[in-house]
Image (cartoon, helix red, strand yellow):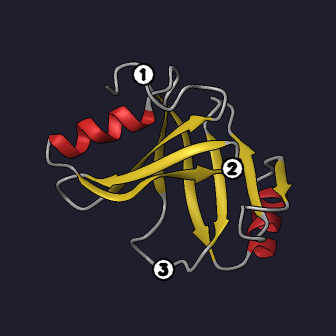
Amino acid sequence: MFTTSRLGAVCYYVNDVDRTEAFYRDVLGLQVERMEDDGEGNPWLSARTANGVELIFIKQESRPGNTPIVVFEIAEGGIDDIFSELADKGATIVTPVSHAPGGWSAEFKDPEGHVLSMYQSADKPRKR
């Protein structure tokens, strides 16, 4: 299941998108791209690291413990089947498969309560 996925992104919830954009751009020197709508009318940010892992910043209440979220990218598609299999194996599903910018995502918890996410672009089939 995870042997064909790659670490695609690390998502952070942030209280202040403007302050976050300035820090990652001006202090860390990353090229930050501002997206104007997350589907709920909020701007969000994207910055790609040298090894291709994307940092995504989403406006949502941020508090210690709810961020960051590690996101695995599904190359072949089939996110619905993967999450069905995870549920069958006893994984706690936090967020069912739902629309995300440019595709689909869903979250689940590991045994220690850490949230992990999977993302699939919209150009891949949701079911195999």
Foreground disc of the pair 2, 1 = 1
* Placement of 103 over or under 94, stated as above or below: above
Foreground disc of the pair 3, 2 = 2
Which mark sits nearer the N-terminus, 3 or 2?
Answer: 3
Residue 63, disc = 3
Foreground disc of the pair 1, 3 = 1
Per the image, the residue denoted by label 2 is 101
Q: Quadrant of residue 112?
A: bottom left
Residue 7, disc = none
Q: CA distance from mark 3 to mark 2?
A: 23 Å
Which mark sits nearer the N-terminus, 1 or 3?
Answer: 3
Q: Position of residue 19 (x, y in %)?
A: 78, 75
Which residue occupies 44% across, 28% down?
127
Tag 2: amino acid: Pro
Q: Quadrant of residue 80?
A: top left
Which residue occupies 25% across, 41% down?
86
Residue 116 appears left or right of 13? left
